[in-house]
């Protein structure tokens, strides 16, 4: 397998990367608006959890989606050739 030939992520991977990035931007926006005073943490309370926990959950979900999107599985023979 030529690394240059398969360097672009698939459509599903690109979707995960985009969703993850959007979730990270949303979490950043939520945090900034809270720090500036436009919103309060209690505005983001969900199911009995504090607002900061909700913001953190959105950020972590974004990181996970992006990480899964950037994951590239190698075959055993390809891994041996790169080392």
Image (cartoon, helix red, strand yellow):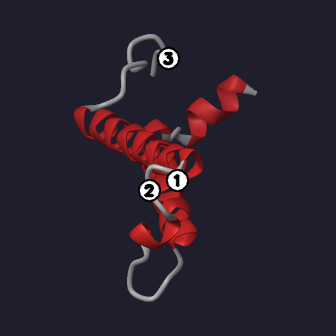
Identify the residue shown where x is 43% and y is 18%. 7
Q: Is mark 2 on a helix, strand or loop?
A: loop
**Residue 66, disc:** none
Vertical placement of residue 27 versus 45, above or below: above
Secondary structure at numbered mark 1:
helix
Q: Quadrant of residue 15?
A: top left
Above or below, comparing residue 53 to residue 4 in the picture: below
Please name the residue that numbered disc 1 is placed on: 34
Crowd around label 3: few <14 · some 14–19 · many ≥20 (10 Å): few
Left or right of 60? Residue 43 is: left
- For the point 41% across and 38% down, the residue is 21
Q: Earlier in the sequence, mark 3 or mark 1?
A: 3
Residue that label 3 marks: 3
| Left or right, residue 75 beside residue 44 | right
- Dot 1: few (<14), some (14–19), or many (≥20) neighbours within 10 Å? some
Label 2: which residue? 39
Nearest to viewer (mark 2 / mark 3) = 2
Q: Do the residues labelled 1 and 2 touch (CB within 8 Å)?
A: yes
Q: Splitting the image into 4 quarters, where does residue 82 fall?
A: top right
């Amino acid at each position: 397998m030529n690394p240059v030939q398969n360097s672009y992520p698939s459509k599903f991977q690109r979707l995960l990367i985009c969703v993850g990035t959007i979730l990270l931007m949303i979490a950043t926006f939520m945090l900034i608006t809270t720090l500036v005073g436009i919103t309060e943490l209690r505005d983001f309370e969900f199911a009995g959890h504090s607002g900061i926990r909700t913001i953190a959950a959105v950020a972590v979900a974004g990181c996970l989606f992006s990480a899964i999107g950037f994951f590239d599985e190698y075959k055993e023979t390809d891994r041996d050739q790169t080392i």
